[in-house]
Amino acid sequence: MRGMSEAELSHLGVGADEELVYRSALRSPGLGTEALALAAGMGVHELRAVLERLTASGMVTVAEDEGIMATDPFVVTERLVESRLTELQAEIQRVIAARHVVSVLLDDQRDGRRRSGPDGVERVEGADRVRARIDELAFFARHELLSVQPNGPLSAAAIEGAEEADTRALRRGLVMRTIMRSDALQDRRTADYLTGLSARGARIRTMDGPLERMLIFDRRTALVPIDPKETGRGALVVHQPGMISSLIALFERFWSAGEDLGQEHLTEIERRVLKTMVRVEKDEAGARELGISIRTYRGHVANLLRRLKATHRTQGVLAARDRGWL
């Protein structure tokens, strides 16, 4: 009997002997202790210990005449599933709670890095190593990411490298504030990227004048270039609280002086095309006035109408005025 089949209830927390006796009782209801022990292929003393556990879990009942009855399988299965789910939920909660270990380990790592450089400053050289360090810091950031990008439009490679990490950070609920130079918005690709970030919850401001490149993670770690004029040389990773405080203060001054990025924006050529649409009826004349090809002019017009959700130019001009573009 012990080899009657593979265990079916083990994944619900039922031991092999308990399942064997329970299924024997299902097949032969009302047997006494000795008869059930014989059916299950085990000694009476061993059976009594198993019956004690089965009775406690409600899987069998033992009558006064020692007749042993198995509880209805539907009832047993529901109880076992519910009990197992409760155990699994508790285990999941323990696993989730263990995430604090990351913070503890990161503190150890930061302590080691503080000791590895003078005054809590770590030197990272080489573009690949800097990029890897930024990815690491962004991945483990838990609250906030502050950044200043002072060099105008972003390259396609820079956008591609940052977009996935930025999106992942925003999905985790990070507060993201970014400051860009105003002329960055004149680049269509950069403007679209920033608008997309803003739509996903990032706060972006632009300003004119000189800016200092920096990244600040959770107000605990900052990254600045070794040489602002030659950013390819590498970066300094700053852990020292006093230096972090000064960098945050500088960021906040930049932030106060900046202007919020709207959900919509126009490049300089788009502004000129839009103003020309108001005054000039024919595309040939408009293109000639702006010094661009008629094909390029019509491409800008079509793009503006699409963004304004307008079916013709008059409607587009009215919509542009409503948005404050004119």
Image: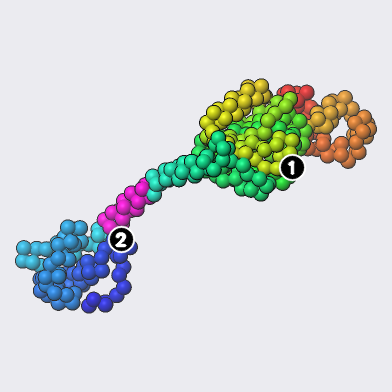
Q: How many marks?
A: 2
Q: Please report contact status of discs 1 and 2: CB closer than 8 Å, yes or no.
A: no
Q: Tag on residue 12?
A: 2
Q: Quadrant of the N terminus?
A: bottom left
Q: Quadrant of the C terminus?
A: top right
Q: Which of the marked residues, 1 or 2, is nearer the chain's N terminus? A: 2
Q: Residue at x 12, y 67 (%)?
A: 48
Residue 65 in the image: state x and y as whole percent. 5, 66
Label 2 SS: helix
Q: Residue at x 13, y 74 (%)?
A: 43
Judged from this view, the residue extending furthest toward the left is 65
As drawn, 135 above or below 27: above
Judged left or right of residue 305, residue 165 is: left
Judged left or right of residue 62, residue 208 is: right
Kindly tell me whether residue 235 is visible in this rendering: yes
Q: Quadrant of residue 223?
A: top right
Query: For mark 2, does the 10 Å Cα neighbourhood hold few (<14), some (14 to 19), or many (20 or more) residues?
Result: some
Q: Tag on residue 155?
A: 1
Q: Residue at x 23, y 76 (%)?
A: 2
Q: Residue at x 57, y 30 (%)?
A: 243
Q: Which residues are magenta?
A: 79-94
Kindly tell me whether residue 282 is visible in this rendering: no
Label 1 SS: loop
Q: Label 2 amino acid?
A: Leu
Judged left or right of residue 224, residue 107 is: left
Name the main secondary structure of what is drawn in magenta: helix
Whether the magenta-drawn stretch holds residue 90 is answered as yes
Q: Label 1 amino acid?
A: Ser
Query: For mark 1, does the 10 Å Cα neighbourhood hold few (<14), some (14 to 19), or many (20 or more) residues?
Result: few
Residue 201 in the image: state x and y as whole percent. 58, 35
Residue 253 in the image: state x and y as whole percent. 63, 23
As drawn, 226 above or below 24: above
